[in-house]
């Protein structure tokens, strides 16, 4: 149980740091989804995990919001891969 708690805190800290840096670049540099592909893949995985966790906790509204964000990042990654 302690191992799971430590892993959860690390994941939450990394997701928080990632979201803050992405929001900072969105606002300060006026960037949108024109990010490196590895950041988009990492964010997609994080939002997918958040969505699944919210569905397990029966927080359906937040689950659907994060699922929508996951879909948005998935479409963005798809267009980057197709354009290559």
Image (cartoon, rainbow, N blue to C red):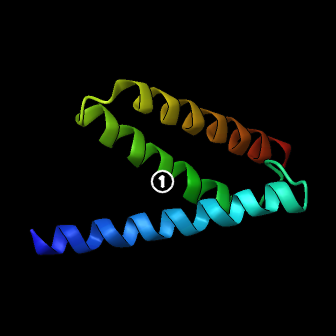
Q: Position of residue 28 (x, y in %)?
A: 87, 62
Residue lying at the far left of the rendered structure? 1
**Residue at 45%, 44% in the rendered image:** 48
Looking at the figure, which quarter contains the N terminus?
Answer: bottom left
Closest to the observer: 37 or 65? 65
Closest to the observer: 23 or 79? 23
Left or right: where does residue 35 sit relative to residue 60?
right
Left or right: where does residue 16 sit relative to residue 49?
right
Q: Is residue 11 above or below residue 84?
A: below
SS type, badge 1: helix
**Residue at 50%, 36% in the rendered image:** 66
Q: Is residue 60 above or below residue 56?
A: above
Q: Is residue 33 above or below residue 29?
A: above
Residue lying at the far right of the rendered structure? 30
Visible in this render: residue 38? Answer: no
Neighbourhood count class around disc 1 (C-alpha, 10 Å): few under 14, some 14–19, many 20 upward: some
Left or right: where does residue 69 sit relative to residue 15?
right
Residue on which disc 1 sits: 46
Q: Position of residue 49 (x, y in %)?
A: 39, 48
Q: Position of residue 35 (x, y in %)?
A: 78, 58
């Amino acid at each position: 149980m302690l191992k799971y708690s430590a892993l959860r805190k690390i994941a939450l800290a990394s997701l928080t740091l990632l979201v803050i840096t992405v929001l900072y670049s969105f606002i300060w540099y006026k960037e949108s989804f024109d990010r490196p592909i590895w950041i988009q893949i990492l964010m997609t995985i994080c939002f997918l995990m958040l969505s699944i966790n919210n569905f397990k906790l029966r927080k359906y509204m937040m689950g659907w919001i994060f699922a929508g964000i996951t879909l948005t990042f998935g479409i963005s990654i798809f267009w980057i891969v197709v354009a290559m």
